[in-house]
Image: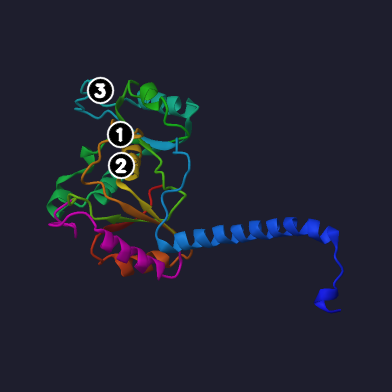
Amino acid sequence: MPLEEVPDDPGARRRRPVVVAIVMVLLAGLGVGAWVLRRTEAGPLPPPDAPWPTTGEASVFLCGSGSAQDNCDGRAIMAAQRLMVERTLRGLPEVSAVRFQSRAETLKDFKKAWALSATAREAFRESDMPESFVVDLTSTGDFLRKVETLPGVSNVYVRGTSFWAGKADVAIRLCPRTAPGKNSPCLGRGEASAAEKATIYQTLRDLDGIGAIYLEDRRHATKDAFWAMFARSPDDTKLFAYIPESYHLVLDGPGAVDRVRRAVSGLPGVNNIEQELS
């Protein structure tokens, strides 16, 4: 039937605005999807909009002979006090696990955590290290107040679970405004430039096995550093020159960590690459 002979259908005329509206909605949806894709392609994502962790870990150090802390009075913890401290820890509702750490284990962790010279490493002995209990916390809350004055306890350090734990696998710390140490590749220069950050990002985008790429600004990084070290937020909004921006990566493959290290460790603006804190 020729087009001009198509009978007029009043129902079709009524339905057409509805059909057009549906088409416009679908096109708008496609447009949003394309925009999100282009936005993701154009640069890294900001940190996820997620609640800050409330969990953490604590080290409960025990008094040794000659401990200067007021709670020790120069005396080493006695066996009965050690047992009382452990029972108290296990009985607290916010405690999910307790592990005793010997002096030998503490010395091993100490040397691993700090880049010491051979001379310095030899200077520290097992007898210099305190015994401790390592405690997993479902909430950092009032743990310090409950434990710090127990007989036989010298110090208590509470650390929060990093914001990035479970959200990313690898952190790429960029050059800060002030170089963090004499062996840093950032020594003698300032913070990573916009061009350097763009080059690092594009290098990461071109690697296989890389999922989401987040860029954490200095304010967010400062908050996370204080939480991970002290289980508290910064006292004010001050930014510290040695805390840099960082890329945080979600890895799709087990071999991606090595590929990341090989690809970006020597790029200008990169300070170091490390596994995310748990």
Query: Disc 1 and disc 2: Cα gap in Å?
Result: 7 Å
Q: Amino acid at mark 2?
A: Thr
Residue at x-position 59% and y-position 61%? 30
On residue 234, which mark appears?
Answer: 1
On residue 72, which mark appears?
Answer: 3
Q: Nearer the viewer, residue 277 or 242?
A: 242
Spot occupied by residue 61 in the image (x, y as percentages of width and height): 31, 32
Residue located beneath label 2 in the image:
222
Magenta span covers which residues? 181-210
| 207 within the magenta span | yes
Spot occupied by residue 108 in the image (x, y as percentages of width and height): 28, 48
**Label 1–label 2 contact, CB within 8 A:** yes
- Image quarter (top left, top right, bottom left or bottom right) of the N terminus: bottom right
Quarter of the rendering containing residue 224? top left
Residue 147 visible to an observer of this rendering: yes
Spot occupied by residue 244 in the image (x, y as percentages of width and height): 27, 50
Q: Secondary structure at mark 1?
A: loop
Query: Disc 1 and disc 3: Cα gap in Å?
Result: 30 Å
Spot occupied by residue 109 in the image (x, y as percentages of width and height): 29, 47
Above or below, 145 against 211 in this view is above
Query: Disc 3 and disc 2: Cα gap in Å?
Result: 34 Å
**Label 3–label 2 contact, CB within 8 A:** no
Neighbor class of circle 2 (other Cα within 10 Å; few <14, some 14-19, many 20+) is: many
Q: Amino acid at mark 1?
A: Pro
Quarter of the rendering containing residue 110? top left
